[in-house]
Amino acid sequence: MKELRFRIILILAAIGLSLYLLYPTYQSYQFQKKIDRIVSQRIKQIKADNPQITKLQLDNRAKTIEDSIKAADPSIGQAFQKRIKLGLDLQGGMRVVLEVNTGKLLEKLANSPDDTFKQVMAASEKEVALSDESVVDVMARKLKAKGIRLSRYFGSIRDDDAKIISDLKKNADDAVTRAIEIIRNRVDQYGVSEPTIQRQGTRRIIVELPGVAREEEAKQLLQGTALLEFSLLKDPQFTVSVMKKIDDVLAGEHINDSTKTDTALAKGKSAATKDTSLASKDSADTQKMSAAEFAKKHPFFSVAILNQRSGTADAYVKADDRDKLKSWLQNPEVQSVIPDNCQFVFSVNPVGFENGQGIYVLYCVDKTPELTGGVIKDASANISPETSAPVVSMEMNSEGAAEWARITGANVNKRMAIILDGVVYSAPVIRTKITGGRSQIEGSKDLKEAQLLAIILKAGALPAPVDIMEQRTVGPSLGQDSINSGFSSVLIGYFVVAFFMIIYYRRAGEIAAVSLIFTILFILGVLAGFGATLTLPGIAGIILTIGMAVDANVLIYERIREELATGKTIKASVESGFAKANSAIIDSNITTFITGIILYQFGTGPIQGFALTLMIGLAASLFSALVIARVMFDYMVAKGMKINLG
């Protein structure tokens, strides 16, 4: 037995290490069950206390509760990070095809683009949408047809068209490469397990995000250009006067160019005007109007509701009216009465709900920001101890910190809007001069959205906008069905193979069946240890490994049978059988392993998943067949136990 001691210790160490590596997976599963139970109980209580609550509100509350539980216990996140990760086909997620808008990049690079250039770019983008041709080539061709040199808009007057085209193509190609790296950086920080990010053609990027099933979440992660701006809100008196001019234009009334300070407010009778007041010249007459009459005479104020008691000019807009108001604000006649130094922007999330419909805030802010996000050095998301709401803490570089101190010191008691990609996350009042370059962004719905915002700020801005050309979502329920089917296949495959081996080889078949269990344990342990991802093709690789693992046992057992047939003792037959079968087993597994390496190197997505589990399975099956099975045989021989090979 002494000669078996080292091998037994090695086997126990391998089993112990595999169980240790798999424990976080078990722990994460138990944590999730506990969280689901707590969330379910609290949601039931919330529904009982507030029967009128909408499904959207319930979902948001459930997400907030889940985030707070996870934030309170760091071990939940640690277990989740160390567990066996599941691929897109098993846990659900999204597959998105993105296209880098190189047309917008060219507009950004152009010197003094005029109407002719904009028309050419619009026609070029429309043409390249139907082909994979470079937008640079199409634009150059169209400008040449108009007799316009490229140096009119790009480079210097001394550059010829060929050089400019070469430089623009390099910029466009670099933009796609940079977009891939920035998206990869964002996705990696977000914690998506084994994402697939690859280039397709000249300007498209394919992204697979396992575990990300929320459409808005994916859009913000992939499309957010990360343009962060800090802009002062306009004075309420000024804002109301601009809104009044817009209202007059929409109502078709004459516009008085002089700046008015008429801040009289009036109420409409519709549900949308409940507990609010609207700017009007004749508040007494307005109160007598019907909702339809009021909407006709004051179209802007019928959808953008002002709250007189708030002391601000923030307008509240229902979700259904938001797109309509945006189109109104883009109207050329309306644009003509909006001063060049201001713009209207919406809040990123609803600030409340009315009859199940979200209510957004419309702000009037300076068009030129006081500070931009280029100064952000670091960002992190956490739960505020004062408000228990998710916040993003930002740290600026030394240049940004000095500028931020100057800006806040000069604008005490004024409101500063924090705008990311054209929407307002929060608009706090500056209470005092802020030194040190630290600030916070509030307004996120939950901790996950705050984490997403922090990631986008840290990862940097995209060089050009990206458009989603195609997206497919794999639901969690479909993923769970795949998991159930996959593991059912593994169990069925194991029991069929084990049954055959036991029937055909008797006691030796039992040894093979036991060693198969350890093979599967080692495969899962290695997957967990290296942070690899288990996919449906990966499960197929495990099933194939089960069949190939007993192939080694078959070779060994047949060799032992041949040795027994020559009259050798069982001990000599076992030793000789293993020795003579070794070369055939190793050769066959090495050739298959090399095939797995080739598949992993040149394959993508599911093919890589299959190749990875196949290679791990080959190594595990060799250890089980040549070490574990051998120890079991040697132990039985040493104890004088009968070994039956059928």
Image (cartoon, rainbow, N blue to C red):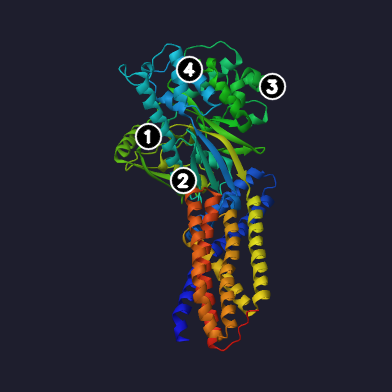
Q: Is residue 21 visible?
A: no
For the point 52% across and 42% down, the residue is 207
Report the amino acid beneath label 3: Ala
Q: How far apart, in angstroms, are the residues tagged by discs 3 and 4?
A: 44 Å
Q: Nearer the viewer, residue 477 or 262?
A: 477
Label 4: few (<14), some or many (≥20) within 10 Å? some
Q: In the image, what residue occupies the spot 59% across and 61% down? A: 544
Q: Which residue is mark 2?
A: 391
Q: What is the C-alpha distance between the residues marked 2 and 1? A: 22 Å
Amino acid type, callout 1:
Val
The disc at residue 120 is 4
**Which of the marked residues, 4 or 1, is nearer the chain's N terminus?**
4
As displayed, is residue 303 above or below residue 386?
A: above
Name the disc covering residue 412, or none.
Answer: 1
Tell me where residue 394 sits by quadrant: top left
Which residue position holds label 3?
292
Specify few, some or many for label 2: CA neighbours under 10 Å numbering under 14, 14-19, or 20 or more: many
User: Crowding near pointer 1: few (<14 within 10 Å), some, many (20+)?
Assistant: some
**In the rendered structure, which disc, 3 or 1, sits on the residue that comes first in sequence?**
3
Tell me the mark number nearer the camera, choosing from 3 and 4: 4
Q: Secondary structure at mark 4?
A: helix
Residue density around tag 3, few if under 14, some if 14–19, many if 20 or more, within 10 Å: some
Where is residue 222? Give x, y as percent.
Answer: 50, 39
Q: Is residue 113 left or right of residue 318?
A: left
Chain-order first, disc 2 or disc 1 = 2
